[in-house]
Amino acid sequence: MLLNLPYSALRAFEAVVRHCGFSAAASELGVSQSAVSQHVKTLEEWLGQDLLVRGARQSRPTREGEQLAQAISEGLGRISDVCGQLRDRQRSDRTIMVSCLPGFAFNWLFPRLLRFDLAHPELSISIATDTGTQPVSGADADVAIRYGRGEYPGNSAELLMGESLFPVCAPSLMPQLRTIEDLARHTFLEDENLPQGAASPTWEFWARDQKITLPKPQRTRRFGQSNMVVQAAIEGVGVAMGREPLVIDVLCDGRLVRPFPQVTKSLYSYWLVRPASGRADQKVSVFLDWIKSEVDGQPQIPSWGPTGD
């Protein structure tokens, strides 16, 4: 007789053991650190014993916890392999599975997919959005579009396009932003899931590169996805650090404008990432050629100013 197992809690616990901590596990699973902690607590209560020795910097499993984590890893790994095989059998030769971040999918890829469909009616694209922290598996996607610095061990990576940084706002805010100092009377809009570190494409990175002293904003609003940052800027909630290519379309159609002329080159880029073993088949090659042509045909960043002149 099979127990009615708490699978979400088991998966969270295994991730904590593998990463030796809650923060990295939460990042992998795409949930909050508190949610992972609650899952582990629930599992410990269900089993009636402690599974982790919690520390300030890292957590390690008890002897029983280590046994359980190994069993979960082996069991879920086997289940994943079988599911991948079953899904592969059902996956049509006409379907191209693409993995990418939600913000990139919403702001850049989705608006362009109609052109792919019209050009290649014999093929279809299936988009899987994820956090982009896991290695690319052929069972999960034919190709992944990753945001980073080109470091993807175990995968092959090809540069798709770079990223430029510059402030953006709704046209209605433009008259209030004549100098950098005017930012003190506005709200900064930020993506709370940006990479960490000095190279992160933040307001501070832009200001440091341009040798600008940023005033303290009136307030800061943080959002969980980059497309939410862009939408908040369009709605006039505040001023965002625009990241090309995520804002190129709304700049070109006038929903956002550039209040200042300074543009900084980001240290992060977008990469086409695939499993290192094997060559791309015909349908994937068609997609790769198409998306590269879309990048080549992307418009230039509009000039700064209220009318884009």
Image (cartoon, rainbow, N blue to C red):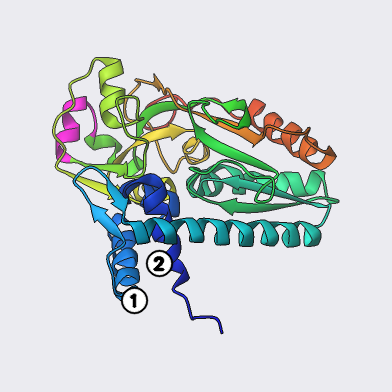
Which residue is under mark 1?
46
- Residue 124 appears left or right of 50: right
The image quarter containing residue 289 is top right
Residue 118 in the image: x percent, y percent? 79, 48
Please report the residue visible at 34 percent of the width from the left and 46 percent of the height from the top. 20
Q: Which residue is found at the position 46% from the left and 40% from the top?
A: 254
The C terminus, quarter of image: top left
Q: Report the label total.
A: 2
From this view, report whether residue 125 is shown above or below residue 43. Answer: above
Q: Residue at x 34, y 74 (%)?
A: 47
User: Are the residues flagged by discs 1 and 2 in contact, CB closer than 8 Å?
Assistant: yes
Read off the residue under disc 2.
9
Eyeballing the image, is 148 above or below 2? above
**How far across and how far down the image is residue 273, in percent?**
62, 34
Apparent side of residue 82 relative to residue 270 in the rendered image (left or right): right
Q: Nearer the viewer, mark 1 or mark 2?
A: 1
Q: In this view, which residue lies farthest toward the front?
A: 63
Q: Position of residue 88 (x, y in %)?
A: 76, 56
Nearest the viewer among 92 and 50 is 50
Kind of residue at badge 1:
Trp
Q: Start and end of the magenta stretch? A: 177-185
Residue 144, quarter of the rendered image: top right
Quadrant where the N terminus sits is: bottom right
Question: In this view of the protein, can residue 31 be seen by the observer?
Answer: no
Q: Earlier in the sequence, mark 1 or mark 2?
A: 2
Residue at disc 2, secondary structure:
helix
